Image: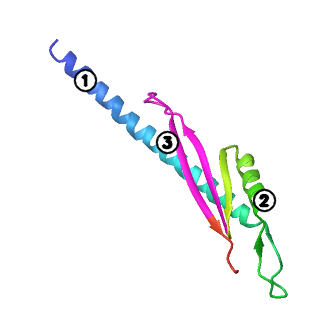
Amino acid sequence: MKFVPMFAMIIIAFFVMAGIVVDGGGQSQTVQEALSIAQSAARAGTNAAAGTSVNGDAFDLSGPMAVTAAQNYLASAGVRGTASVAGDTVTVTVDMTYHPHILKIADIPVHVTRSARLIGN
């Protein structure tokens, strides 16, 4: 009978360790997904360039078009986020939430920012 409390503590410790491994991996995967979506949305925004390189003109980034393109990408990916343009750089912030599967203490927010710059100017 004196081994029952120790056995219970070992079971709880294994449960917590499994939760840290599974939920930590899940959070990491959510962060990677958010990074990928943010970077792709920023690239989509830089595709909203106007101009032609055939006659030597530089490309210009249309701010409203770039923001719209990035937001459309976020919407198609089904995530919340914001996009902004500063000069020739499109910056996208993505907000996602990881819902733990084992350690259901609280949802874990994931907030990442990535940017893409129009080159060739």
Of 103 and 58, nearer the camera is 58
Work out whether 53 lies above or below 24: below
Of 113 and 36, nearer the camera is 113
Give coordinates of residue 86: x percent, y percent: 66, 65
Secondary structure under badge 3?
helix
Q: In which quarter of the image is residue 46?
A: bottom right
- Quarter holding the C terminus? bottom right
Q: In which quarter of the image is residue 95?
A: top right
Q: Distance between the residues labelled 2 and 3?
A: 35 Å
Name the amino acid type tagged 2.
Pro
Q: Circle 1 is placed at which residue position?
A: 9
* Magenta residue span: 89-115
Task: Residue at 23% x, 21% y: name it.
Answer: 7
Left or right side of 96 for 119: right
Of 111 and 18, nearer the camera is 111
Work out whether 39 lies above or below 24: below
Q: Circle 2 is placed at which residue position?
A: 64
Secondary structure under badge 2?
helix
Q: Residues within 10 Å of mark 1 (few under 14, many from 20)?
A: few
Q: Distance between the residues labelled 1 and 2?
A: 58 Å
Residue 106 magenta: yes
Work out whether 55 lies above or below 43: below
Residue farthest top in this picture: 1
Name the amino acid type tagged 1.
Met
Task: Residue at 20% x, 21% y: name it.
Answer: 6
**Residue contact at pointers 1 and 2, CB within 8 angstroms:** no
Of 6 and 67, nearer the camera is 67
Q: Circle 3 is placed at which residue position?
A: 26
Name the amino acid type tagged 3.
Gly
